[in-house]
Image (cartoon, rainbow, N blue to C red):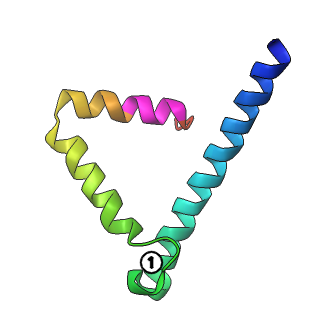
Amino acid sequence: MDSMMKTIVGFVNGLTGILVAVIGLGIVGSIAVGADNLFFVGDVIDNLVMYVGMLGDSGLAGLIVLLIIMGVLNIK
């Protein structure tokens, strides 16, 4: 049971790392070639701005969600 949980946690951590890398690639690609030319990622910067705005509008709840996200992604 313990090895299965380690395997699942390792898979989820790997998948999270890949998705964070894709977000970074989308941001750099949006800056370099424009959001209209990124058919596989979309407009990453506008989506991030929208989510930050939603967190800011939520006040304390938004701050708590931001701290949870930072904890999940191991951002210090």
Please provide the residue range marked out in magenta: 67-72
When the figure is inspected, residue 60 is found, relative to residue 73, above or below; the finding is above
Splitting the image into 4 quarters, where does residue 60 fall? top left
Residue at image location 23% in from the left, 28% down from the top = 61
Residue closer to the observer: 25 or 4: 4
Which quadrant, please, contains the N terminus?
top right
Question: Relative to 14, is 71 above or below?
Answer: above
Q: Which residue is mark 1?
A: 30
The one nearer the camera, 18 or 7, is 7
The answer to whether residue 8 is left or right of residue 43 is right
- Dominant secondary structure (helix, strand or loop) of the stretch shown in magenta: helix
Residue drawn 75% across the image and 20% down it: 5
In the rendered structure, does residue 71 fall within the stretch colored magenta? yes
Name which residue lies at 43% across and 72% down.
42
Give the image location of residue 32, x and y in percent. Answer: 49, 84
Is 5 on the left-hand or right-hand side of 40? right
* Horizontal relation, residue 18 to residue 40: left or right: right
Asked whether 56 falls inside the magenta stretch, the response is no
- The residue at the point 53 percent across, 32 percent down is 72
Where residue 28 sits in the image (x, y, percent)?
Answer: 51, 73
Residue 14 in which image quadrant: top right
Callout 1: few (<14), some (14-19), or many (20+) C-alpha neighbours within 10 Å? many
Relative horizontal placement of residue 17, taking residue 48 as reference (left or right): right
Q: Amino acid at mark 1?
A: Ser
Q: Is residue 57 above or below residue 48?
A: above
Looking at this rendering, what residue extends furthest in the top direction? Answer: 1
